[in-house]
Image (cartoon, grey):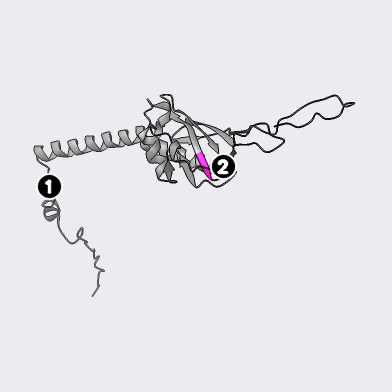
Amino acid sequence: MVVLPVRTEEVHSFAGCDRAQADSHFVIPTTTQRVTMRLIAAMLVACLLLAACSVTTPRSAQKFVATESDYADIAAMSLKFVERTAPVSTIVLPANADPRVRAALKRLRPLITPDKVPASDTYKLAPGYFALQTFDIDAEGIATFEGQLGPVRKVPELPATDDCGIRFSIPFALEGNDWASHTLKKSVCWPKREWWPVDEAAPAQSR
């Protein structure tokens, strides 16, 4: 007897189900569902575009409008500049100051008006007092912070002929989304320089 080999084949079903079962799980969305999906997709695209514009367009390239946050940022940076010279304990602020200026500085130091500056036989403005003279932000995104730091003596100490304390002038410009200051002017009324010929005696100091 001759035994012929029998060929066997393995048949695998897809995911344990036949075609009919697979087709039964495929759901065709209705017209209302398709419209809703398109609306959601359009809203997502619009949100992404708005977010991209807000990120890529800096404030300096937009129409500028000063905010309370701008005044707060500039006030904090300016005070840091001033206190590199001497600490500030009190800020002297005019009674008619811009409310945004008042709110920004009030967060940093106690405020008083000029008529409340402590009387002194020695000082017009005592050490630790800073008298604000200018703090404004224009429509172009340019800001100016200026003031006078005590002590300011009533009678100048020689060789000074006048005493105005230390005056600060700090300009700011909006660069991108941030405020920047690249210059700082600090000036005093003394010492006064006097020049005379080398073959003559120095002139006498006077008040």
Residue 67 x %, y % = 36, 34
Whether residue 72 is visible to the viewer of this picture, yes or no, is yes
Q: Which residues are magenta?
A: 125-130
Q: Is residue 33 above or below residue 199?
A: below
Q: Residue at x 80, y 28 (%)?
A: 203
Q: Is residue 128 magenta?
A: yes
Q: Is residue 150 visible?
A: no
Q: Quadrant of residue 61?
A: top left
Residue nearest the observer in this picture, 6 or 204: 204
Q: Please tell me the numbered disc located at residue 27.
A: 1
Looking at the image, which residue sits at the far front? 121
Local crowd size for mark 1, using a 10 Å CA cut-off: few (<14), some (14–19), many (≥20) = few
Lateral position of residue 85 relative to residue 76, left or right: right
Q: Quadrant of residue 128?
A: top right
Residue highlighted by disc 2: 121
Q: Quadrant of the C terminus?
A: top right
Callout 2 amino acid: Asp
Residue at coordinates 50% horizontally, 42% vertically from top-left?
Answer: 119
